[in-house]
Image: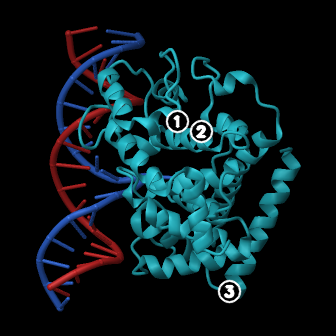
Chain colours: A cyan, B blue, C red
Amino acid sequence: MRGHEKEQRAGELEASLLEFHKQVMPLHGVVQAENMLAFVAQLIDSLHRVEYVHAIRKRPIGAGRTDPRNPLFDPIRAAVVMSKDQPEEAFWLVFLATHCGRNLRTEWQLVRELYGASEAAPWTWARVLADPQAYADWIEDHHDEFQGKFGNHRKYESLKPGVHGTSAVMMSYAAWIKDFGSHVQMVAQAQDQAQGDPRLAFALLYNQMRDVLRFGRTGRFDYLTMLGKVGLAAIDADSTYMNEATGPKRGARLLFDGQIDSKSNARMLEGRVSALERHLGVGMQVMEDAMCNWQKSPNRYLSFRG
DNA sequence: AGCCGAAGACTTCCCCACCG
DNA sequence: CGGTGGGGAAGTCTTCGGCT
């Protein structure tokens, strides 16, 4: 995006926030000019992260992106490529990418390794589904050989054998999908129940996915929003689910009340976030991401240009 | 009303690679 | 060879929903 477009977008968001502040409900946290500047910058960064997947869907994707033996391997681009002809494999890659996360230093290396970079043939979904125990055993046997690291969101995950380790997570995911029959049927049953409402379908899946080990709020939110962005499921986050997290809740308290130790509870805050999201029209994932990042330094506008 | 379990873009601690 | 910082494992504390 060109500079003046970014500034125009910032101006529009600021105007929309001010209108909401005056006409709907006060936003005590962005009354100060530097706070407003910082929050708008976070909204724009979050919009870019969401739009990034839409951007790569429109561009040609090289063959190396789908090959785990290639350093260019990228599970999200691979999922985009496969979403049409091999949807089951695409879902599996989104799951692997979410479980591992993208590490700042090693990038997608851990996903490559778990997908079978060093093997004669990759651990495809068909292979994992046919014998999840064989995949779990292989992970445990090789757990100390993997060089890739977990991403920031997944920094409490472990490759070591045990009830909380990656091998156990993979077993529980395979069992969860097997229950529906397939990934495609997993999405279809939710959309049937929701009668095609993308936000209701998201809420249903968010609850059903509790069965997947180690997939708490962050894991489920990241996995399901990515399915939507890649185009594998017509679902859309209906809530920030801040009752299960501290970052977005702190951000919402700061934004609406101007202080992190306000008495507003998660339900009240969630209602206000919902109203503000409808006003701005940016989507719940952007609201969640922006509030969470903003509360870390609410009065510091960190320009990436300088 | 109050207990209990679950979960966390937590918090703390320890280890190790890296650096001067 | 001691300081430093990142990463992994384990430990706290708070919140909240479910349950009685």
Query: Which quadrant is home to the C terminus of chain A?
Result: top right
Q: Find disc 3 in the rendering and name its residue.
A: A24
Q: Nearer the viewer, mark 2 or mark 3?
A: 2
Mark 1: secondary structure: helix
Q: Of the numbered discs in the image, which one, if any, rests on residue A89? A: 2
Badges 2 and 3, same chain: yes
Residue at image coords 30%, 27%: A140
Instruction: Determine the CA span between mark 3 and mark 1.
Output: 52 Å
Quick check: can you spot residue A299?
Answer: no
From the top left corner, tell me how far across and down residue C4 is, in percent: 35, 27
Q: Residue at x 62, y 25 (%)?
A: A73
Q: Are marks 3 and 1 on the same chain?
A: yes
Q: CA distance from mark 2 to mark 3?
A: 45 Å
Residue C9: name its quadrant: top left
Residue A190: name its quadrant. bottom right
Residue A126 - label: 1
Q: Amino acid at mark 2?
A: Glu
Asked if disc 2 and disc 1 are in contact, CB closer than 8 Å, the reply is yes
x then y, percent, for residue A196: 68, 71
Q: Which subunit holds the residue at mark 1?
A: A
| Sooner in the amino-acid sequence: mark 2 or mark 3 | 3
Name the secondary structure under disc 3.
loop
Q: Disc 2 vs disc 1: which is toward the camera?
A: 1
Specify the amino acid type for callout 3: Val
Residue A209 falls in image quadrant: bottom left
The reply, left or right, for residue C13 in relation to residue A71 is left
Rendered image: mark on residue A194: none
